[in-house]
C-alpha cells in the first residue's frame, strides 16, 4: 500500500513539474513572440454606419497576430474625447503606430503633439484633420470626399431643371460631411437650385428618420426633387420617412442620392429607390498595412492614398455586383 502511495505521489510530482516547465515555456514563448509583433493602437470612431462596421472589420482582418501584429482596438462611441483618451492610453502603452479615424477635423493638435514627442507615427484613416503642423501625421489613407460630392452633383446637373433639394448632412466638421457638402453648396449657387433645408443626420439611419419625419410633418407638403443623403444609412432613414409621408422614391418621384455603396444601399439602388450612389471604399486595412510596412522599411510614405471609387445607378447595376460586395 505504502509503495502504491509513493508511486502515486512520485507520478503526481512528475506531472506537476512537467506542467510547470510546459507553462514556463509557453509564457517565455509568448513574451518573445510579442516582442516581434508590431504594436498598433487603433482609435475607431464608433459603429454609426454599415460603412464603419466594414472599415473596422477590414482593419481587424489585416492586423492579426498570425500576420505579425498586436492590435489594440478602441471604439470611441462617436465621441472625440474618447478618441483623445484612447490615443493617450496608446502612448502610455508604447505602441509602435497609432491609427486614427478622426471623427472631426478640428481639435487634434495637442494630443498628436504628445504622440509626436513620444516618437509614435500617426496614420490617419478615412477622414482628415485640420492641423497647422503637417508633421503631426505620417500619412493619410482614405477618400477624396469633394470628388465624391462632385460626382453626385454632375448627375444632378444633367436633370437640367431648377431642383428643390433636401440635404441630410453627416457628422458636423467631419471631412466626409465637409467635402460632400461643399460640392453641393457650390452647385446650388451656380445652378440657382433651391436648397430647401439642411438637416443633420449624423450619418445614422435613426437620426435621419427622425429629422426627415419632423421636416415632412409640416402643414404644407414640400415639393422635393432630390434628397441628398451623405451616406447610405441616412438614405435608408430618409426613404423610410418619405414613404411614410406618401412620397415615391426613384424615377418619377424623389431622387434619393447617397454615398458609400454598401450591399444594402446597392440593393435599394437596383430596386430604383436610390437613384445614384457614389462609392466610398471602407476596406482600407491593406492600404494601411502598406503604409506601416513602408515606415518599417524606413521609407517615406505619400501624404495621401486615395482608394478607387465608382458611381452606381439602377441601370448600371447587376445582381452579380451586389452579391460580390463584401459589406
Ligand atoms: O460615408 C459614413 C461613415 O467617413 C467615409 O463615415 C466615412 C463616412 C461614411 O459613417 O457611412
Image (spheres, grey):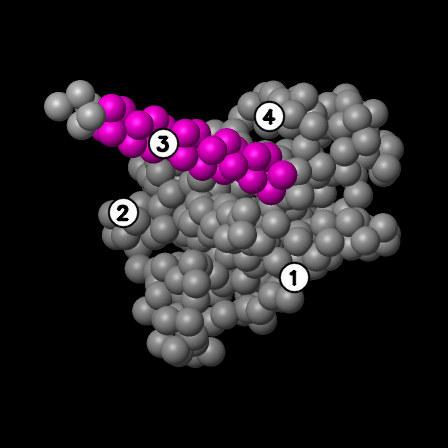
Mark 1 CB within 8 Å of ligand 1: no
State how far apart marks 1 and 4 are (Cα): 27 Å
Q: Earlier in the sequence, mark 1 or mark 3?
A: 3
In front of the other: 35 or 208: 35
Query: Do residues under tags 1 and 3 come within 8 Å of each other at their CB atoms?
Result: no
User: Is residue 41 at all visible to an observer of this figure?
Assistant: yes
Q: Which residue is drawn at 42% across and 71% down?
A: 324
* Rendering coords of residue 194 (x, y %): 56, 50
Q: Which residue is drawn at 29% across and 31% down?
A: 11
Q: What element carries label 3?
A: helix
Residue 199 seen from this side: no
Label 1 CA crowd tier, 10 Å (few <14, some 14–19, many 20+): some
Q: Is mark 2 on a helix, strand or loop?
A: loop
Q: Give the range drawn in magenta.
A: 6-34
Tell me the residue that label 3 is attached to.
14
What residue would you read off at disc 1? 307
* Badge nearest the viewer, 1 or 3: 3
Q: Is mark 1 on a helix, strand or loop?
A: loop
Say which label, 3 or 4, has the lower sequence index. Answer: 3
- Distance CA(mark 1)–CA(mark 3): 59 Å
Residue on which disc 4 sits: 86
- Nearer to us of marks 3 and 4 is 3
Quarter of the N terminus within the rendering: top left
Amino acid at each position: 500500500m505504502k509503495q502504491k502511495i509513493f508511486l502515486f505521489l512520485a507520478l503526481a510530482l512528475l506531472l506537476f513539474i512537467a506542467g510547470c516547465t510546459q507553462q514556463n515555456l509557453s509564457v517565455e514563448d509568448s513574451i518573445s513572440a510579442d516582442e516581434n509583433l508590431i504594436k498598433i493602437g487603433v482609435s475607431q470612431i464608433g459603429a454609426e454606419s454599415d460603412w464603419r462596421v466594414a472599415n473596422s472589420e477590414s482593419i481587424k482582418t489585416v492586423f492579426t497576430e498570425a500576420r505579425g501584429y498586436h492590435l489594440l482596438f478602441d471604439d470611441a462611441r462617436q465621441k472625440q474625447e474618447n478618441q483623445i483618451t484612447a490615443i493617450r492610453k496608446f502612448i502610455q502603452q508604447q505602441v509602435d503606430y497609432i491609427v486614427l479615424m478622426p471623427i472631426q477635423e478640428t481639435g487634434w493638435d495637442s494630443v498628436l503633439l504628445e504622440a509626436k514627442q513620444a516618437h509614435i507615427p500617426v496614420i490617419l484613416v478615412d477622414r482628415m484633420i485640420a492641423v497647422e503642423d503637417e508633421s503631426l501625421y505620417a500619412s493619410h489613407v482614405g477618400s477624396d470626399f469633394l470628388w465624391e460630392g462632385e460626382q453626385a452633383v454632375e448627375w444632378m446637373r444633367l436633370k437640367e431643371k431648377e431642383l428643390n433639394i433636401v440635404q441630410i448632412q453627416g457628422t458636423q466638421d467631419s471631412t466626409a460631411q465637409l467635402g460632400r457638402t461643399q460640392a453641393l453648396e457650390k452647385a446650388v449657387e451656380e445652378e440657382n437650385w433651391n436648397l430647401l433645408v439642411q438637416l443633420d443626420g449624423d450619418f445614422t439611419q435613426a437620426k435621419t428618420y427622425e429629422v426627415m419625419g419632423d421636416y415632412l410633418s409640416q402643414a404644407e407638403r414640400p415639393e422635393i426633387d432630390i434628397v441628398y443623403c451623405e451616406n447610405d444609412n441616412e438614405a435608408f432613414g430618409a426613404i423610410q420617412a418619405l414613404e411614410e409621408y406618401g412620397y415615391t422614391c426613384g424615377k418619377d418621384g424623389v431622387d434619393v442620392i447617397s454615398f458609400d455603396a454598401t450591399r444594402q444601399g446597392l440593393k435599394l439602388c437596383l430596386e430604383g429607390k436610390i437613384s445614384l450612389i457614389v462609392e466610398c471604399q471602407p476596406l482600407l486595412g491593406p492600404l494601411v498595412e502598406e503604409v506601416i510596412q513602408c515606415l518599417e522599411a524606413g521609407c517615406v510614405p505619400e501624404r495621401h492614398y486615395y482608394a478607387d471609387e465608382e458611381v452606381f445607378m439602377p441601370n448600371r447595376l447587376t445582381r452579380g455586383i451586389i452579391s460580390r460586395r463584401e459589406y
